[in-house]
Amino acid sequence: MSVLYACKLCLLLVLLNSASHTVAGTVAPPTPSAGFSLPIVSNHNTAGMLGQLGANLTSIGPHIAPVGWPLYGVLVGVGSGQTRHFYKLGLDLVSNLTWMQCQPCVPEVRQEGAVFDSALSPRYKHMKPTDPKCTAPYTPSSRNRCSFYTTSWNVAAHGYLGSDTFAFAGSPSAGGGHNRDVDNLILGCAHTTHGFERLSHNILAGVLSLSRHPTSFMSQLTARGLTDSRFSYCLFPGQSHPNTRHGFLRFGRDIPRHDHAQSTSLLFTGSGYGQSSMYYIRIVGISLNRKKLNGVKTAMFRRDLQTRRGGSVIDPGTPLTRLVRAAYDVVEAEVAADMHKQGARRSTVPVQGYHLCFGSWGHVHFPSLTFNLYEEATRLFIKPELLFVRVNHEHLCFAVVPDEEMTVIGAAQQVDTRFTFDLPGNRLYFAQEHCSADTHPTV
């Protein structure tokens, strides 16, 4: 992750293609070679799912589902034999490292199932400070271990690097199957956390990193030749199938093909982008009800390479979309004016976590929002029902909030759009989809 925010909503990403040239309009992502999927799971007892886990690695299918609005998690097994336990990890596209709470942990944030105890896992190995991977941002420790400290959206975790066996679910395209183990995957054993209780919803045990960093889950699988650096997810509405269905985090050939997908460049995050492992895109403007807002300027979304502030990223681990302040002020004023013209009345009572709320709204037609991207005619459309949430009986709130540093397209506004990340081609593909159709019943 990068800066985990309060209710962090963790989930999964995108569609494919290798062209690094400018692509406008609709395009077809390339056909991937190898692939698998992981379950995205909801807030329910995982015991009933363990029998489904398995298949060979080219058909792993991690389950993904809402854990708490708008929070999504991925089901993975850690350990081996009788010591293996299954955990729900929040999906994270900005953090360098997959990490989870480990014994002893202070504070021990409540999660689903027991906190992982590396001392009881026969295949767990501590990373030594002499290991070539124990380099910045990781540091050698006096305890002959390699330590990590990570922060993302106001959540911090500190502990030691290690490796263990991970188990994943079978892909639906392969008919499920049995456990598939992957040995010696690096993870962070967190012994101290700060702010994790705001993310976990008493369910999540940690986060699963899909960033570009060499120690992320994605990079480790790619380095072993187990996937081709393409992954995809389609977030379905949490209210549609509470606790009964799960979706999938898909890799390689398990990713559905969309001939009508649009694409935009993923800005390379090497030296020119401040060594960040996040997935930056280039936003040039915003439209409300498909009408361009002239007050929103391209410069508002630029990343300052000196201060490493600004820019725009995609992150399903951020619950609500966060607009950089200058752009947000323009959008908020236009949304408020549009709602006011239809008879809605802005609330004067503050609502925690939101910036624009209404105390009465009657039968208004909610506005839509469109992110205009760098490539001509490439637009990410956010339908009206994803932009407003009824917080309680008295308040309807705009599900976009201001940010003092950058713009983040969050999970709530990614629902019913399939995102596919093609890392070799540095492109993001996206297409509207009825994401509930890509779910399976949870046993």
Image (cartoon, rainbow, N blue to C red):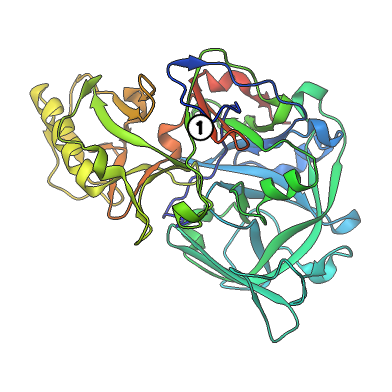
- Residue 210 picture location, percent across and down: 61, 46
- Residue 238 picture location, percent across and down: 50, 32
* Secondary-structure class at tag 1: loop
At a point 72% along the width and 35% down the height, the residue shown is 228
At a point 75% along the width and 45% down the height, the residue shown is 221
Among the 4 quarters of the image, the one containing residue 47: top right
- Residue 293 picture location, percent across and down: 18, 29
Give the residue type at disc 1. Answer: Gly
Please identify the residue farthest to the top as the structure is shown: 259
| Drawn side of residue 415 relative to residue 58, left or right | left
At a point 23% along the width and 48% down the height, the residue shown is 325
- Mark 1 residue crowding within 10 angstroms, few (<14) / some (14–19) / many (20+): many
- Residue 384 picture location, percent across and down: 31, 23
* Residue 274, visible in the rendered structure: yes
Is 392 in front, or is 229? 229
Is 13 in front, or is 364? 13
Reading the image, the residue beneath label 1 is: 238
Among the 4 quarters of the image, the one containing residue 110: bottom right
| Drawn side of residue 8 relative to residue 258, left or right | left
Up-down: is 79 above or below 253? below
Up-down: is 113 above or below 169? below
Quarter holding the C terminus is top right
Up-down: is 273 above or below 142? above
Is 248 in front, or is 184? 184
